[in-house]
Image (cartoon, rainbow, N blue to C red):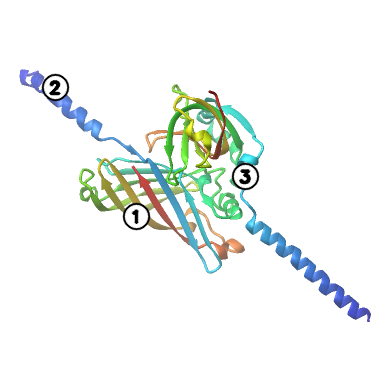
Amino acid sequence: MPKFLFKLLPVLSVVFISTKSFAQKINSKTSNISFYSHTAVEDIKASNTASVSVLDPTTGDVVFSVPMQSFDFEKALMQKHFNSPDFLDTKTEPKAKLVGKITNLSKVNFKIDGIYSAEVSGEMTIKGISKPFTAKSTITIKGSSFEVESKFEIILEDYGIAFKKGKPSTNIAKTIQITVLAEY
Amino acid sequence: MNRKKTMKFSVIVTVIASLIAGTVVFYLFNQPKRDVQATKTDFRFTASQLVTEYLVDAKKANAKYLNEDGNSKVLEISGMVANISENYNKQKVLLLKFPADSAGVSCTIISVKDPLLNQIKLSEDIIVKGVIRSGASYDKDLGMYENVIMDNCKIISTKQ
């Protein structure tokens, strides 16, 4: 090996190590995932503060893992229906998951404070069914921490949740709104 | 006369039946949430025991501890306080985890006014009662172990 390469070795290793340590996934400190279903009969809301998320600012990879039984409802009966095998079947499928990537990462500078629009696309798994997913989100960067906020809609039937008749078919909307907030 | 009596009787029966049905529907619709702390404890474990059971066979553990209606098993978990944090609703979250374990049990304390909360210190051994929401596992996408999640928790014992 040429001599100059030996001299370069410490420099290269420092570059490699610093790049590697920068490419780290950041864990969420707090999160709140809520959903809202609106029909003429009733409005249903629930929120969940127990989700775990990681985001890698260098690659744009973002993951959310959502413990489904942690959704808290206003009414006990709604919570029971939500968890039941006919609806989310949370005993068999206790977690929902989002694995995505910020597709316009070049437009988000995690080193400069500001509010950035980010587009996330990937795959969402609910009740064991995975579907492609895209959503617009806002990333607010302040110092060493940042916040992600996203609002989007999902069609329940896409995830095998469909009611043809009975009370749920009139009381639960076919499309529900999801709001995701996470602080990193 | 008899016909009139029969009519009167059926009207009374219909009214009573409607009242009963209405009350049942009203109760079901407005039934209170389960008071986890007033519910009998189903299992007592150390954080390590529960985590190990999940890491060995998560499917079997879910079948044992999670209920279909979301009113899952009420557990008392003893363990070492490895982390104290706050969730989005400003509730305290205690992580019970032994240093050698890959994962622990994350317990969201229901009352922000719980006087024991201010006394809790890191590395202290405590016992927490609450309801299990999900188990521990290694998640390849997150690239880390996920803790067992419990909420509606209360500290029931501290070893001073």
Q: How crowded is mark 3: few (under 14 residues within 10 Å), some or many (20 or more)?
A: few
In the picture, the disc for residue B35 is 3
Q: Which amino acid does label 3 sit on?
A: Asp
- The location of residue A124, given as percent across then percent down, is 41, 49
Q: Are marks 1 and 3 in contact (CB under 8 Å)?
A: no
A141 shown above or below A42: above
The extreme right residue here reads B1
Q: Which amino acid does label 2 sit on?
A: Pro
Chain letter behind tag 2: A
Chain letter behind tag 1: A
Judge left or right: residue A160 versus residue A20: right
In the picture, the disc for residue A135 is 1
- The location of residue A70, given as percent across then percent down, is 51, 45
Classify residue B60 by image quadrant. top right
In the picture, the disc for residue A10 is 2
Residue at coordinates 53% horizontally, 38% vertically from top-left?
B114
Q: What residue type is labelled 1?
A: Ala
- The location of residue B93, given as percent across then percent down, is 46, 37
Q: Is mark 3 on a helix, strand or loop?
A: loop
Q: Do the residues labelled 1 and 2 touch (CB within 8 Å)?
A: no
Q: Are marks 1 and 3 on the same chain?
A: no
Q: Front-most of B109 and B100? A: B109
- Please name which of the two marks, 2 or 3, marks the residue nearer to the observer: 3
Q: Front-most of B45 and A170? A: B45
Q: What element carries label 1?
A: strand
- The location of residue A4, given as percent across then percent down, is 6, 21
Residue A174 visible? The answer is no
Residue B29 visible? The answer is yes
Chain letter behind tag 3: B
A120 shown above or below B78: below
Q: Can you say which quadrant of the picture contains the C terminus of chain A? A: top left
